[in-house]
Amino acid sequence: MLNVTKILKRAWQILWNYRMLWVFGFILALTVGAGGNSFSNNNSSRNDRQENGQERPWNLHPSDDWNWEGLKGETPGEKLNEAFRQAGVEIQKLQAKYPVEFRMGIAVFITALVMILIFSFIGAILRYIAETAAIRMVNEYEQSGVKVGFRQGWQYGWSREAWRVFLINFVVHIPSLVLFVILGVLGWWIVSAALSGVESTLVTSLIAGIGLAFVSILITAVLMVVLYLLRDFAWRMTILEGTGVLESLRLATTLVKRNWKSAGLMWLVMIGIKIAWGIAFIILVIPLLIVSIITALGGIVVAVVPTLLTAGVASLLSAPDYWPWIFALIIGLPFFATVAFSPILLVDGWAKIYESSTWTLTYRELKALETVTSTVVEAQ
């Protein structure tokens, strides 16, 4: 049976004895989820209003110049097309009234979008390099007691195994992508029913859509829990044993099936540790933010060069008034935030290295137990 206490203690010792792992933990804290940034606009709802005895659509907030009669198409598709046409008219009016602000607003939006894509791409690369490096460094430390420096650790991460780690993570998240498509289809169904104007159809679609969405989310959540557990073992198989993506997942499934009690016990223990760490982290945030006031000075120093360069280039490109500084803020803010909040990222990186080390030690222990068991069986 798996010695959970021994593994947890050893992971704790590795965390504090192997300081170079902190660097890769910092990278993990900075980049985990970098490819999943999302921005949502929370628009406040207005009360339904009536004009000339006709009720306006409840989810649209246009100006009084809109042609509401044009929205009375025969099908939901026609109504949406007309709504988009009316929106285009309003945008053209806005562009004619505020030409400079409209042009600069579009440029700011494109700049922000490009920066998000660039940082997401770089963050994803760094994340899988750090994941691979941390697993290899801990495994080698357990095998030989050798601690490597940053250059060797980076070489461990900069490998084709890091690409396989990414692919395994992608395969594991396919159910989430399917769920996203299902929820999109259900949302379109409900919107179409709303635009049809038939109350009974809307009520039916709402009840059925919410029910199907709930079932889909529940099934996906349970499936993702299992897949995340398999992923942790599959990552270590592809990194430490050089197996392919699908082969690693298959072997991880077999390993977990043969040792489901030990794997399940460790999963429960790690859930408990994550909950406890979440509470502790909330308590630590306040003193860490105080320390961040000091590191914010370093953030300003780091961000000042890209900020001023961006403002200068924007001025040369004829950006008027205060707009160059808006572009500068978009470019300089990520550099400032990384340094300013480095204490929080460092502490969060400790947690990520501890978790990674725990699963690496668990994988090694399960493999060792299976080797011992097979040896005993052969001896008999």
Image (cartoon, rainbow, N blue to C red):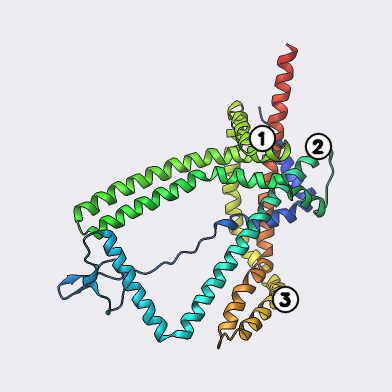
Q: Amino acid at mark 2?
A: Gln
Q: Residues within 10 Å of mark 3 (few under 14, many from 20)?
A: few
Quadrant of the rendered structure where residue 302 is? bottom right
- Which image quarter holds the C terminus? top right
Quadrant of the rendered structure where residue 242 is? top right
Q: Is residue 99 above or below residue 204?
A: below
The Cα–Cα distance between marks 1 and 2, rounded to whole angstroms, is 19 Å
Query: Residue 358: where, in percent of width, then height?
Result: 68, 41
Q: Is residue 231 left or right of residue 43?
A: right
Which circle marks residue 4 in the picture?
A: 1
Q: Is residue 50 above or below residue 248?
A: below
Q: Nearer the viewer, residue 42 or 249?
A: 249
Q: Is residue 267 above or below residue 311?
A: above
Q: Residues within 10 Å of mark 2 (few under 14, many from 20)?
A: few
Q: Is residue 116 left or right of residue 175?
A: right
Q: Earlier in the sequence, mark 3 or mark 1?
A: 1
Q: Earlier in the sequence, mark 1 or mark 2?
A: 1
Which circle marks residue 143 in the picture?
A: 2
Which residue is pictured at 57% across the width and 38% down the height? 268
Question: Disc 2 on helix, strand or loop?
Answer: helix
Q: Amino acid at mark 1?
A: Val
Could one spot residue 355 in this view of the protein? no
Query: Residue 236: where, in percent of width, then height?
Result: 68, 39
Which circle marks residue 301 in the picture?
A: 3
The Cα–Cα distance between marks 3 and 1, rounded to whole angstroms, is 45 Å
Which residue is pictured at 58% across the width and 43% down the height? 272
